[in-house]
Amino acid sequence: MEVLLRGIKRLGFDLGEEQILLFQRYFQELVDWNTRINLTAITDDREVQIRHFLDSLTVSLVIHRDVLANGTLMDVGSGAGFPGLPLKILWPGLQVTLVESVGKKAAFLRHLTDTLNLEGVQVCNERAETLAHDPHMRETFDVVVSRAVGDLSVLAELSLPFCQLGGRVVAQKKSGIDDELKRAEKAISLLGGALERVETVDMEEIGEPRCLVVLSKETESPSSYPRRPGIPAKRPL
């Protein structure tokens, strides 16, 4: 985990011995399960450290420390657990909800959570469009993160309804997103959000610059959103 440790220090954080062991076990389980189900195309040790673990942890740069210490975080479209589970390992007090609609991937997340003995992690095997209308989930989270949910206009509809007022959405994007931000303005405003800032992450270990798009939740999301499963992606706002 040398590459991860070096990158973590560059971000201004540290990993304890137990956390390093958790990341090592995470890697082993990821590679093992990936032989049976399609979790990731990246299985090289060094590349997993960089493109999955370290890249996920950059999200910490734009989340308030009190939220990281004991707040609530939802990861929409979690897949193999990124960025939600690496954030949980780095910040043990964080209460994490992983939303993953694919049953086999959700099974992996449950297995991994049990194997790593992570407390305060909930796995929801549902579509975000459906789950966002659950009163126990709607507008209750301090921060909602996502790294692989397509265009920002779609992500706004799938994530902002989960944010409590004053909360944040953090979307991980590649650089050069000016056009995407412009297209998403209507959706962000309609769902009760506003663009707070775009933080550029430029690290030697990761390579090409990445962007963290931070949306703030300013008003309640209209009850009719998100629309039915599949509609946000087919007909973006």
Image: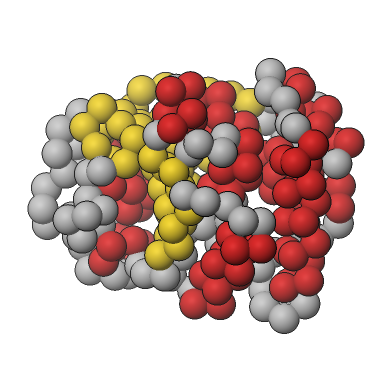
Q: What colour-coding does the image apply? A: secondary structure
- In this rendered view, identify the residue nearer to me: 226 or 65: 65
**Residue found 83% across the figure and 28% down from its top:** 6
In the displayed orientation, state which residue is furthest to the bottom: 36
Numbered marks: total: 0
**Residue found 14% across the figure and 39% down from its top:** 220
Task: In the rendered view, tell whether residue 72 sits above or below residue 39.
Answer: above
Relative to 67, is 221 on the left or the right? Answer: left
Residue 232: horizontal and vertical position, in percent? Answer: 30, 60
**Residue found 28% across the figure and 47% down from its top:** 162
Relative to 41, is 180 on the left or the right? Answer: left
On the question of residue 66 being in view, the answer is yes
Task: In the rendered view, tell whether residue 62 sits above or below residue 177.
Answer: above
Q: Quadrant of the N terminus?
A: top right
Residue 151: horizontal and vertical position, in percent? Answer: 43, 50
Residue 234: horizontal and vertical position, in percent? Answer: 33, 66
In the displayed orientation, state which residue is furthest to the left: 223
Residue 173: horizontal and vertical position, in percent? Answer: 54, 40
**Residue found 26% across the figure and 53% down from its top:** 137
- In this rendered view, identify the residue nearer to me: 200 or 144: 144
Q: Quadrant of residue 166?
A: top left
- In this rendered view, identify the residue nearer to me: 179 or 42: 42
Q: Quadrant of residue 160?
A: top left
Task: In the rendered view, tell whether residue 171 sits above or below residue 60.
Answer: below
Q: Quadrant of residue 231?
A: bottom left
